[in-house]
Image: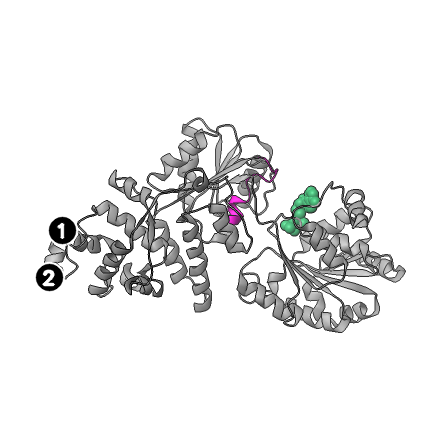
Amino acid sequence: MAEAEALLREVFGFDAFRPGQGEIVEAVAAGQNTLAIMPTGGGKSLCFQLPALLRHGVTVVISPLIALMRDQVRALRAAGVDAGALTSGNTDEETEAVWQSLEAGTLKLLYLAPERLASGGAMQMLRRINVSLIAVDEAHCVSQWGHDFRPDYLRIGELREMLDVPVAAFTATADEETRAEIVTRLFNGVQPTTFLRGFDRPNIHLAFSAKNSPRKQILTFAAARKGQSGIVYCGTRARTESIAQGLRDAGMAAIHYHGGMQADDRREAELKFQQDDGLIVVATVAFGMGVDKPDIRWVAHSDLPKSIEAYYQEIGRAGRDGAPAETLTLFGPDDIRLRRTQIDEGMAPPERRAADHARLNALLGLAEALTCRRATLLKYFGEDCKSCGNCDLCDNPPATFDATEAVRKGLSAILRTGEWFGAGHLIDILTGTETDKIRERKHDELPTYGVGKEYKKTEWQAIFRQMMGLDLIRPNGERHGALFMTEAARPILRGEDQILLRKDSLAAAGKDRRPAV
Ligand code: ADP
């Protein structure tokens, strides 16, 4: 590996490998079929560029984005590496130059848009030249399961068989369905050497908090970090504007950003954020793709993101420079309801919807975690981590209590009323409250009526929220959000499972604040 390290310094100008890069480079350079899952910004391109230089012949790189290919080719050429791209964006001269390098046998990396694989000419050319490796960037594009499916990616399997050379596939998408599909389609079902590295961002402090007055909570968080660059993510366009105004009123430099703004205004906001020191951007998720600012010191969510992947992406924009960065994610029952409804009412096919619910559940599980948040997060991505010492739960481990009995009472209220009611009415039943609705429906005659008097209403709300967070119950979109019981709750009803809930959320409820869900 001495040669690899020398190239790392001399060609790429880096002192050391990032976490995971060294091992991946070694496997790819040795000609192993490889699948590497690394987060965005983790440094995937080096993991095929460097082996390309170590191997004889040409490395063919399949990549879905022309702009990205061109950037990489430019950077490689600037570093003295003979690289070229064949894309629809080429000028005739560029294409000619690539052919000449190929003829001369000097070309080391040939970037190809996947569409090229559909043309017989390109396939023939690839057969003639000395290809030693196929690198597939954004390999999840081969998966029909994901968002970015590109039909031409399916031809890569054919290309591999035709050339009979190793494949190195790269993606930031970690979920198992996608991974399995990559293995099937790119590696003919034979498990490649797989690396999952670099998801841990130890300098980012992780924290969640119950949403009680989001505007005030965000202002307080930002004010404590005045003068630092930060991003506030909001669920709606309107809220980006109102929170940005609130921050400005409190004497902070803040702008808003959302997809409803003119392209020019968006561009201007991005530039301003990039250039100014200590500016806060209050944005929808539309913000961030094109932003490469290393010294973002904090990211706050005024609303719960839509999935654990989205959460990870968004907080990951903080602290790219490796210096300490902080995050705060607010969440409450309305967020959970909103996200579930968005999934249920979306246009996605049923399997996709089930997967989206699962990704949201994973995030709720993280929000509800009882022990180290980072360990919970990394476990989802398949990486191990001991208690990190840099999250709110390591700072202050939450006290728990055995809530099995309370949860069973809650479930029983739901079932005995036919899964037709929302939390408010169910809590009235549990606490034995006399209301017109209860009398009309004769719910005061239910055996569950009044069995939950040991908890106040606000405490019951906290219990229901945590039950929702644990996906024991869900709102039914077709019944105006009436709660129903999920399969996950069955073992609790049968007395086979114990449920621990966080004590602090009940204590907070006792003070009549909206508690941690
Ligand atoms: P990805 O494709 O994984 O999103 P890139 O390959 O574009 O990420 O790399 C992200 C950034 O990290 C680039 O600016 C790259 O120059 C930088 N980088 C990659 N490897 C190293 C390294 N070993 N040391 C320092 N910087 C690196």
Residue 139 falls in image quadrant: bottom right
Q: Position of residue 150 (x, y in %)?
A: 61, 65
Residue 86 shows in the view: no
Residue 178 magenta:
no
Seen in the image, is 325 located left or right of residue 222?
right
Residue at position x 14%, y 62% in the image: 446
Look at the magenta stretch and give its main secondary structure. loop
Mark 2 = which residue? 445
Span colored in magenta: 312-323
Residue visible at 33% across and 40% down?
212
- The answer to whether residue 89 is seen in the rendering is yes
Residue 245 lies, in percent from the top left, at 42, 33
Indicate if the residue with disc 1 has its beta carbon within 8 Å of ligand 1: no
Task: Report the disc number at residue 433.
Answer: 1
Residue 429: give x, y in percent of width and height.
17, 55
Question: Position of 214 compared to 5: left or right?
Answer: left
